[in-house]
Image (cartoon, rainbow, N blue to C red):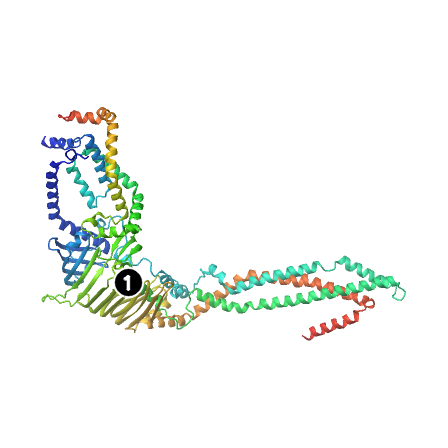
């Protein structure tokens, strides 16, 4: 039995309570500034530029918190804020907090200003960023997602533009493309065929009567002259008859072989000539593989504006994906799941998730319009309902609606509408964003080592909508600019001329895009007058260079085919000059002998007649 | 002088409750502290045992250091155990109920390695206490003499006017 007196120490209760009270007092007095600093550091780390909070007040008893003057630095202009929020008041559920769940009943944000000046630079310093640099909010979304489209754009027609413009086109990709040449494959097949035919003919010539045998036959026939048929014995006559039949049958056999060999030979020669037709086809294939602009009407919009569109798509896709399905469900039962989640630094976590409440939930977020009379009022207002981190497990719909004008940013008619539906399987989220008017300044349309196109100033209008079904995507959007001023630059004067011609009198730009993604592939089409016109201009101006490329490609193909062609020619020559000639010579020797032996061969006349018929027919042909 | 006295007074706590029971309890509580991470609510509850139980602080400290090392080295084993328990169908309703109770989610029991550590530490508490009690009885004569011959004890004794 446990002796309570020996184990428990009643005297320890007083110091413990004293210490606990002291700790509680310290925490109660200092947790707000500590929490404020912690929040600033964590938010800054995640966002990628400084986020400052002037004041944080929390009342755990009332279940309220308020933040004052929150400044979000503009990452591309650290001396300005992207947004400055004067007040954020929030009410949270105290009971849920005891259950380690932060359920925010209401967030109200007011006094929102855009593009305000910062007192000090908002560049993230080393102290906050720490040694373990990991991707911040902006960079996170750029990791992967639409890599196939990026590759497609990288290998697009503009890749070869600089080589075309300088006329110094180098066929760097050729070694890999060699394999895909149809003519090359054809000649390889032909070589195999010729080799097989040569082998067959070689076998046949090895079976021809040898020189000694022919000499022997000739000597025998010559001897018959000294002993004419009339005085020859019956036995001798029989011997002569047998030899005559033997020579005739040999002749017939070799004649047949030669006939078929000649047929094959001529066929091979004819087939060899057919390779020329394949050359043109290969030329087109190579041009296509090298992504050279082949048609005058080709649209270069994808290569020109693709990276902007892909970047936007990747960002949206990343956040929707993260919101929708942050982990893999290891086990599930109604309203309850065990989830495996892999963090960006590849650490695996297992969470037990319940359908009854969430770890983090915003029931309602409201952005209130600023009615301060002394300043230019912002009409920006909006609502966010039921935003839950890990909605996948809670089957709740999140709806976001924001609209208004932001004077600091000169954005007019901004509308954001998001519907994140988790209650349907498969999930179906939709997003619509439109801005009636916003300024574009120093916006890089396309910048490569060879050329750059920049919009120095313009007023733009943007509209996009998309739906995300499970991992699929369907989106379309339009960007229009008016009063557009361009700045173009290229190190190749002919190309700079084209760019200047394209932009000198142009004040508008319209780019339309459509994207779709299913489990197998991602497709993106972008259209614009600018892209079409640029392709036409390039095609016209660089026609000469393009024809030079044609010549270069043709020469390359011919170079690639040369060894095969030579080998094939050698094989055919060997067949014609050695193997077939040998057959022909043997045949003429046999014919000569047959003229002396025909007297002894009963079938000779018939054979002669048939032979002359075949020869005549061949001549007629 | 007062500060030095206070320090010695504080150090004397490390020698207090040097009974078999105090030493064994120190080892068991040290195990609870060593196996449970500092960012969990159970660690702070176990920390109050130092005040509420008659235990030897030196052994608690030594034991917690040893078990902290065990926790560090056996992280994967605790993870496997926790994952097994969390994924067990028959226990799912139990975990679900726990998850929605006040305070309990602060134990982070739903993270596999945390659960593994909690389970092992709780199940080990009484057996370790009883085992330590037996072990101390066997080892005490040797350890006591050995400790009294160490230089560290000599220094401590030399500076401490009221040492035994």
Label 1, on which residue?
A: A316
Question: What crowding class fits label 1: few (fewer than 14 Cα within 10 Å), some (14-19), or many (20 or more)?
Answer: some
User: Which chain letter goes with mark 1?
Assistant: A
Q: Quadrant of the C terminus of chain B?
A: top left
Horizontal and vertical percent position of residue B100? 21, 53
Side of A149 relative to B154 (left or right): right
Q: Is residue A331 above or below residue A231?
A: above
Quadrant in which residue B145 is drawn: top left
Side of A568 relative to A462 (left or right): right
Horizontal and vertical percent position of residue A452? 32, 64
Which one is nearer the viewer's eye here, A557 or A424?
A424
Does residue B21 appear in this view? yes
Q: Quadrant of the N terminus of chain B?
A: top left
Residue depicted at 42% across the width and 67% down the height: A292
Side of A570 relative to B76 (left or right): right
Q: Is residue A607 above or below residue B27?
A: below
Which one is nearer the viewer's eye here, A238 or B131?
B131
Callout 1: SS = helix
Does residue A120 appear in this view? no
């Amino acid at each position: 039995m446990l002796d309570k007196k020996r184990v428990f120490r009643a005297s320890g209760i007083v110091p413990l309570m004293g210490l606990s009270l002291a700790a509680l007092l310290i925490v109660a007095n200092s947790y707000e500034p500590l929490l404020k600093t912690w929040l600033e550091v964590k938010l800054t780390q995640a966002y990628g530029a400084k986020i400052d909070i002037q004041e944080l007040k929390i009342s755990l008893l009332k279940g309220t918190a308020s933040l004052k003057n929150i400044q979000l630095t503009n990452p591309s202009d650290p001396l300005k804020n992207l947004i400055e929020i004067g007040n954020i008041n929030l009410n949270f559920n105290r009971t849920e907090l005891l259950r380690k769940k932060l359920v925010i009943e209401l967030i109200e944000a007011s006094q929102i200003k855009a593009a305000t000046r910062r007192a000090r630079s908002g560049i993230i310093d080393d102290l906050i960023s720490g040694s373990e640099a990991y991707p911040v909010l902006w960079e996170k979304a750029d990791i992967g997602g639409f890599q196939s489209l990026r590759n497609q754009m990288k290998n697009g027609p503009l890749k070869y533009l600089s080589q075309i413009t300088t006329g110094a086109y180098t066929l760097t990709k050729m070694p890999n493309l060699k394999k895909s040449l149809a003519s090359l494959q054809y000649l390889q097949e032909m070589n195999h065929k010729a080799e097989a035919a040569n082998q067959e003919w070689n076998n046949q010539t090895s079976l021809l009567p040898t020189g000694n045998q022919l000499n022997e036959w000739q000597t025998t026939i010559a001897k018959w002259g000294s002993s004419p048929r009339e005085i020859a014995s019956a036995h001798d006559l029989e011997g002569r008859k047998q030899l005559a039949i033997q020579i005739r049958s040999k002749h017939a056999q070799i004649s047949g072989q030669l006939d078929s060999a000649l047929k094959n030979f001529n066929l091979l020669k004819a087939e060899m000539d057919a390779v020329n037709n394949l050359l043109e086809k290969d030329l087109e294939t190579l041009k296509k593989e090298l992504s050279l602009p082949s048609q005058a009407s080709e649209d270069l919009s994808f290569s020109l504006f693709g990276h902007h569109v892909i970047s936007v798509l990747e960002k949206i896709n990343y956040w929707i994906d993260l919101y929708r399905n942050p982990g893999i469900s290891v086990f599930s039962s109604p309203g309850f799941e065990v989830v495996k989640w892999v963090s960006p630094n590849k650490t695996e976590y297992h969470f037990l998730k319940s359908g009854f409440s969430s770890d983090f939930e915003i029931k309602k977020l409201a952005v209130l319009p600023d009615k301060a009379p002394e300043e230019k009022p912002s009409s920006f207002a909006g609502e966010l309902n039921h935003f839950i981190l890990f909605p996948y497990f809670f089957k709740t719909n999140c709806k976001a609606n924001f609209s208004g004008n932001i004077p600091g940013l000169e954005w007019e008619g901004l509308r954001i509408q998001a519907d994140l539906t988790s209650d349907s399987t498969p999930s179906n989220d939709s997003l619509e964003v439109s801005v009636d008017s916003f300024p574009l300044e120093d916006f890089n349309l396309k910048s490569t080592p060879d050329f750059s196109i920049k919009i120095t100033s313009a007023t733009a209008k943007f509209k996009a909508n998309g739906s995300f079904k499970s991992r699929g995507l369907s989106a379309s959007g339009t960007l229009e600019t008016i009063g557009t001023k361009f700045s173009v630059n290229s190190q190749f004067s002919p190309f700079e001329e084209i760019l200047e011609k394209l932009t000198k009198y142009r004040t508008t730009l319209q780019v339309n895009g459509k994207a779709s993604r299913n489990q197998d592939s991602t497709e993106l089409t972008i259209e614009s007058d600018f892209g079409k016109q640029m392709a036409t201009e390039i095609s016209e101006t660089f026609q000469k260079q393009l024809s030079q490329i044609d010549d270069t490609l043709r020469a390359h193909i011919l170079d690639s085919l040369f060894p095969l062609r030579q080998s094939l020619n050698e094989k055919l020559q060997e067949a014609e000059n050695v193997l077939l000639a040998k057959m022909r010579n043997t045949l003429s020797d046999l014919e000569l002998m047959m003229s002396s032996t025909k007297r002894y061969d009963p079938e000779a006349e018939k054979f002669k007649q048939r032979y002359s018929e075949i020869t005549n027919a061949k001549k007629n042909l | 002088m007062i500060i030095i006295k206070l320090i010695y007074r504080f150090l004397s706590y490390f020698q207090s409750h040097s009974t078999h029971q105090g030493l064994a309890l120190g080892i068991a509580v040290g195990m609870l502290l060593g196996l449970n991470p500092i960012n969990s609510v159970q660690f702070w509850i176990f920390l109050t045992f130092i005040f509420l139980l008659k235990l030897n602080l030196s052994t608690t400290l030594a034991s917690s250091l040893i078990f902290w090392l065990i926790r560090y080295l056996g992280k994967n084993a605790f993870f496997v155990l926790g994952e097994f328990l969390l994924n067990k169908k028959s226990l799912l309703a139990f975990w679900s109920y726990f998850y929605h109770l006040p305070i309990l989610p602060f134990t982070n029991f739903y993270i596999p390695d945390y659960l593994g550590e909690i389970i092992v530490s709780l199940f080990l508490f009484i057996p370790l206490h009883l085992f330590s009690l037996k072990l101390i009885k066997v080892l005490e004569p040797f350890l006591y003499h050995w400790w009294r011959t160490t230089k560290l004890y000599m220094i401590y004794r030399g500076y401490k006017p009221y040492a035994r």
